[in-house]
Image (tube, helix red, strand yellow):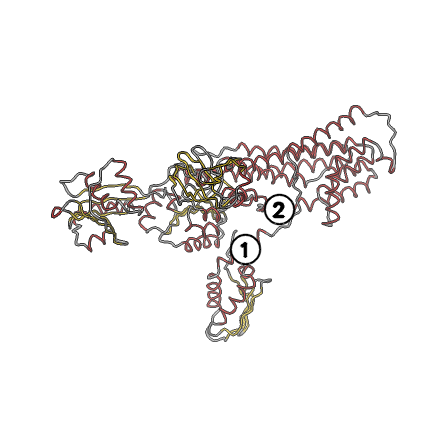
Amino acid sequence: MKNDNLLACEIVHRIRGRIRIKSKAFKYIGASLKTEIEKQLVQVRYIESVEISLITGTILIYFEDVSLSEQNLINLIQNTLNSHIFEICKNEKIEKSSKYVIERKLQEETPGEIIKKIITTAGLLGYNLFFKSKQEVVTTGIRRFLNYNTLSTLALAMPVLKNGINSLVKNKRPNADTLSSSAIISSILLGKESAALTIMFLEEVSELLTVYTMEKTRGAIKDMLSVGESYVWKEISEDNVKRVPIEEIQKDDIIVVQTGEKISVDGKIIKGEALIDQSSITGEYMPLKKAEGETVYAGTIVKNGNISILAEKVGDDRTVSRIIKLVEDANFNKADIQNYADTFSAQLIPLNFILAGIVYASTRSITKAMSMLVIDYSCGIRLSTAVAFSAAINTAAKNGILVKGSNFIEELSKAETVIFDKTGTITEGKPKVQSIEVFDNSMSENEMIGLAGAAEEQSSHPLATAIMTEIKDRGIEIPKHSKIKTVVSRGVETKVGKGKEAKVIRVGSKKYMLENNVNLTAAIDAERGIISRGEIGLYISQDDKIIGLIGVSDPPRENIKKAINRLRNYGVDDIVLLTGDLRQQAETIASRMSIDRYESELLPEDKAKNILKFQSKGSNVIMIGDGVNDAPALSYANVGVALGSTRTDVAMEAADITITQDNPLLVPGIIGLSKNTVKTIKENFAMVIGLNTFALVLGATGILAPIYASVLHNSTTILVVLNSLKLLKYDIKTN
């Protein structure tokens, strides 16, 4: 989606008390929103009536010509439209996706079935070329078709003939098969079955390569996400389990999974605990411990442990099945260039019939006219895009990248602005202790951290987790302590020691310390360092004395800086950071990563509005995010990319591309693939148009016989398919 100043307004005309204003946005508001906006504007003082036209994209306003200037009216309309911008953009996306209605034949046969057809056609062609008697009398009329050779040719050509006729009858227009049918019938009437069979043979080879690519793509996706289990252990009773086919499992059945086995349903653990590898679904490379009451997903692996799972989602309802379906439905989300190719190729088909008529009228040569029928641009042009995009989606899938449609590959190739979320995208999403300051000379660093751990031991707060991880890594023993008290949004405290010797240990914010009369003079210099580095400071006090300051931050992902540099090499000249974090933290990470601009302290809807702001200026925007808070922005970007191990299901559903691996280098990698795909398609277009035009000229002049014209045309189609297949070997650099 590219808004191109979606909210821009233009005055069509104005007379006293009446003005008509045009805006692209009015075409996408819909009937219900139209009524709502009209009611909203009528409430404004001095406005008497409002009428919006969805067809012309204009608004007609009658008003008291007292104080409302043209600019005031435009500002009023833009502000009103901006309050409904999400719905407007959504409608624009829907409108754009349904712009083209294309007839496009996709074969349902498997590669094996097509190979059988090729062998049969090749056998019959060999007979006609090498064994058919040269002395056979050429019959005319209906008898021309009443022989084994001709009937066999027609039988093999029947799918093409049927589809070509159906297009004329149902769609009232010819398609590529109509053209092929005309050439095949003409060849037979001229007694040249070999020409008809050559046309069919080369088309079948081209079709085989196309179907092979698409099958390979489906296979790559399914292999990456496959549940992989044909049979599962179903609990019949408490002491009885039975091995049954996966297809028999129903909702609320209990499945028993042991060490080394794949989980085949989405559900909750009702018994046992296990270490589970969820990398196929979440991208998280570290196995997670799952216990009773926690959710597990089909396609994940039990690394250690035995669990019983209550099946909640089976078959196509499973998360893994939904992901596969999202990607398999990619054919319905065609790129503009693919829609253009399909439309252009369909419009060119009648040209061949016109040329054939002109050539015959000029030369009275059926042979020359037939050459016009065996050469068409449509097949090569369509396959130029279809195979290239399918190969690209295949390569992406093999690298753990799920693309929901070829349109997103094309959009990626035009990337101008790439926007990153911070937490979990640029950073790991796992806060770590970065700096430690001790202000009590009688206390070691480990002793101070141990006291902090005594207060934070029971907390699930991410900052507490960072401290506890540091304690575990250092092997520090936490001293015995009393009950922990939590002060919401402030900190935690406990007592260490016994009786009168017990010391109050507090861990928390600066405000928490000041509220408890802790003297922070000793921490002033260390505090400045914490702020300058963009860390979050956790203050540790003993009674009313500050004893330490721990700086915690979320470290950048490995290779994120390299990924950003590669994006610039691919022509992305504007890299932006959008985050809900504080300004200082955003500024620090933006500076470290050499990011052009940043916006901080944003709500989810603020991120989405920033996306729309960039788009309104004509930028092609790519949004990289991972969580629920990124979902609106992912939805409204030209391409939304859900990245890595911390991404949520919501982010995955909202995104157009999902990267299942925890590697930011895959972002520039998929952009590089997209640019190479579009380049390949342009090469294909040049080959199809150039070689087929050359063949048409030679055919019209009689230099090229129909059978050789067919060979040249179909060889061109095969050539563009082979050129597209090189994308299967494209190297998405991951290091």
The image quarter containing residue 118 is top right
The image position of residue 475, as x and y in percent, is 25, 35
Q: Which mark is residue 274?
A: none
> Residue 7 in the image: x percent, y percent?
50, 59
Q: Give the image quarter of residue 176.
A: top right
Is residue 239 found left or right of 435 in the rendered image? right
Residue 687: quadrant of the picture: top right
The foreground one among 168 and 456 is 456
**Relative to residue 12, is residue 510 drawn left or right?**
left
| Closer to the eye: label 2 or 1 | 1
Judging depth in this view, the residue of 107 and 321 nearest the camera is 321
Q: Earlier in the sequence, mark 2 or mark 1?
A: 1
Mark identifier at residue 92: 1
Image location (x, y in percent) of residue 497: 15, 44
Q: Say which residue label 2 marks.
A: 340
Establish if 68 lies above or below 219. Answer: below
Which element type, helix, strand or loop, lies under badge 1? Answer: helix
The three-letter code of the residue at mark 2 reads Tyr
Spatial separation of the CA atoms under disc 2 and disc 1: 19 Å
Residue 570 appearing in the image: no
- Inspect the image, locate mark 1, and give the three-letter code of the amino acid beneath it: Glu
Residue 624 showing in the rendered view: yes
4 with respect to 132 (left or right): left
Q: Secondary structure at mark 2?
A: helix
Q: Disc 2, disc 1: CB below 8 Å? A: no
Task: Report the quarter where the C terminus lies.
Answer: top left
Instruction: Decide if residue 53 is on the left or right side of residue 437.
Output: right
